[in-house]
Amino acid sequence: MSLFHLLLVALIQGITEFLPVSSSGHLILLPNLSGLQDQGQVIDVAVHVGTLGAVVLYFWRDVRLGLSGIPRMLTGRIDTPGSKLAFLLAVATVPVIVAGLILQVTGLADAMRSVTVIGWTMLIFGIVLYWADQRGPQTKRDGDWSLRDAINMGLWQAVALIPGTSRSGITITAGRMLGYDRESAARLAMLMSIPTIVASGVLLGAGVIAEADVQAARDGAIAAGMAFAAALAALVLMMRLLKTVSFTPYVIYRVILGVILLWLGYSGALTTA
């Protein structure tokens, strides 16, 4: 792959992974709209590793707290902040793993990779995010996260397997519906992304490492590094903006892009739609 192609994929994945605009949807659109070749699983795994590194670094205090609580959680003692966080993150991750396996086995994952599907999900879930953000109360903080809320947000996160939905967007939407303030909803969504990205990377990476040659490994390392930088910058910017700005700018972007994609898909302008 050319350096430009690697940069393009890394920037798209890095910037959109944590913004509520759907990274998977944008990566599917890239070859459809640009004519570029699909980047393949090696690069997919690499950019996921890069974004994983960014979110772990940004939320290192929370990550360290959760990791410290894993031993107590495994022995059934959910009696410390760390063990509670580890337990709730594990619970919230189960639905997306189960749903992901079902989609892979049934082949539905590939069937949903179309421009029209992404157009509808961009539009519909963008409007849902706006409604939740404007109507949802802001009475809870991330420290109030409960088992019921973790299950609820985990179920919503599984819906993000439909391309264009946005994993971060749908979990933030769920958080706002449950009454979490904007920063807390985003924080919980980002923390939920860590085990989800790990699970996704393991699924995508099955057999990839053994088949990758030196050139593919080099391309993957470059893509991972660039995705890490892009994701970290996007995280810092979004979390700072949430102190003063709502999710409306992302909603506007989603609605505009959704309408354009639906027009392209139903007008026949794209034969791949």
Image (tube, rainbow, N blue to C red):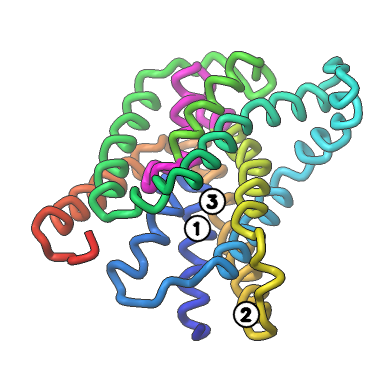
Q: What mark, if any, has residue 92 been given in the picture?
A: none
Decide which of tag 1 and tag 2 comes sooner along the chain. Answer: 1
Give the magenta-colored segment's residue range. 161-185
Residue 10 is left or right of residue 225, and the answer is left
Alpha carbons under labels 2 and 3: distance apart: 31 Å
Residue on which the image places disc 2: 216
Residue on which the image places disc 1: 15
Mark toward the viewer: 1 or 2: 2
From the top left corner, tell me how far across and down residue 22 is, in percent. 42, 49
Q: Residue at x 19, y 54 (%)?
A: 260
Q: Amino acid at mark 2?
A: Ala
- Callout 1–callout 2 Cβ contact below 8 Å: no
From the image, give the main secondary structure of the stretch colored magenta.
helix
Around disc 1, counting alpha carbons within 10 Å, would you say few (fewer than 14), some (14 to 19), or many (20 or more)?
Answer: many
Q: Residue at x 86, y 26 (%)?
A: 74
Q: Is residue 84 above or below residue 20?
A: above
- Residue 12: in magenta span: no
- Callout 2–callout 3 Cβ contact below 8 Å: no
Q: Amino acid at mark 1?
A: Ile
Q: Nearer the viewer, residue 106 or 70?
A: 106
Q: Residue at x 59, y 63 (%)?
A: 47
